[in-house]
Amino acid sequence: MAEGQSMTVADVVTQVRDGRLEDFVREAVALVAREIMDAEITAEIGAGLGEVAPESRVTHRNGYRPRAWETRVGEIELLIPKKRSGTSYFPSFLEPRRRSEQAIVAVVLEAYVNGVSTRKVDRLVEQLGIDGMTKDRVSALCRALDEQVELFRQRPLEGAYPYLWLDAKQVKVRDHGRVVSKAVVVAYAVHESGVREVIGLDVGEVESGAFWTEFLRSLKKRGLDGVRLAISDQHEGLKAAIARVLGCPWQRCTVHFTRDMVMHCRRDQRGLVAAALREIFNAEGYEQARERVTHVLERLKDVAPKVCELLEAAEEDLIAFYSFPPEHWTKLRSTNPLERVNKEIGRRADVVGIFPNDAAVIRLVGALLSEQNDEWLVQRRYLSVESMALILADPTPDTDEAPELTEAGHLTAA
């Protein structure tokens, strides 16, 4: 064993007394950690080091593996005991994986022990090197994760959140013996301080107006306030739910709209249509954007009549972002700022394939989003305090009965 790992209690006391220990606390932590590991490995093996216990022993020790352990008192080099056979030993005081990694393991194992595993899940369990996984052990792991995720999902929302992004992804879930497609709905927002946050997560049967209305009401109950603009892709019932619950304009994602529009054209027309639409979304202001819509409709009426029809119907929803500070436009006109997070959710969901139940979806996505939220809270502000002050200076009236929207998507006078 390494010299630092072989110290005894007497050694620590002696060095403290003689003033020869440069970092007593770190050495003391290392000593305690070694004692804990020795007690735990002894319990798992059924015998102490060198002890003859044929009746209780289930396997033998098989050396050590080094691992660096970052603590508040500095890095400690641990020597973790290994077993000759059976499940690998891992110290109880270490967290083997981040929350999101624990969650994906929990989801895979829950599917496995409940008899809904596929060949892919079988391979994952084998690759994870987990043997003897019982329902009780899986349930314990799930409960611990669920408690963390639920605290994150239900935390109070304080202050104003002027900008709200809503996104939905489809996942496959086993429900009453059938595999069905369900929507994972996530709400992101920018706080009045300019910091991004994940503020909501839920799973629904369908993306209906009733589902969206209930989801937005749950955010309001937790304290969501001061929303000036909601940004999302086109979802059934969402626009009406936003007007009904939040009473704010809706910004339709311009990137997704452009992708949808080019599919209504011949292949040789797609470049022309995409370029024309980009001109609208890169205007210098609201009035110029409306003028460009008129010009685009004139240019494309013979080339792509279906695009013109859809553009004219969606005009105000596509240029709503021009009513806000120019510094915010690139972030408000689409859901692209969330693409990296959405791709990560998709990647984890693809690993699982078919979720065993709704709770497993919430567990995995919630663990991932809570980690993302932690990262956002310590990063630089998403929008500057100075630019946020421009919209906070003219707050939207907060009433129980949401004001009606005009055809242009603006609020009526209170």
Image (tube, rainbow, N blue to C red):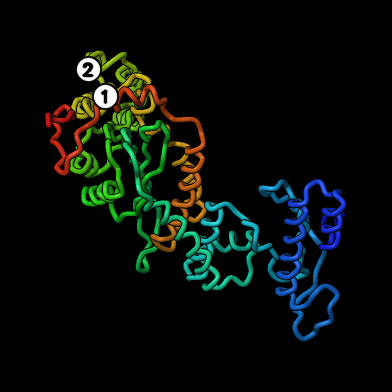
Mark 2: amino acid: Arg
Q: Do the residues bearing badges 2 and 1 touch, measured as CB atoms within 8 Å?
A: yes
Percent position of residue 292, x then y: 25, 15
Front residue of 199/173: it is 199
Q: Which residue is mark 1?
A: 319
Residue under the point 29% across and 35% down: 230
Q: Quadrant of residue 38?
A: bottom right
Rendered position, 86 above or below 226: below
Res 290 label: 2
Percent position of residue 35, x then y: 75, 65
Residue under the point 24% across and 30% down: 395
Quadrant of the image containing the N terminus = bottom right
Front residue of 22/387: it is 22
- Total label count? 2
Residue under the point 30% across and 29% down: 261
Q: Quadrant of residue 329?
A: top left
- The crowding category of the residue bearing disc 2, from other C-alpha atoms within 10 Å (few below 14, some 14 to 19, many at least 20), is some
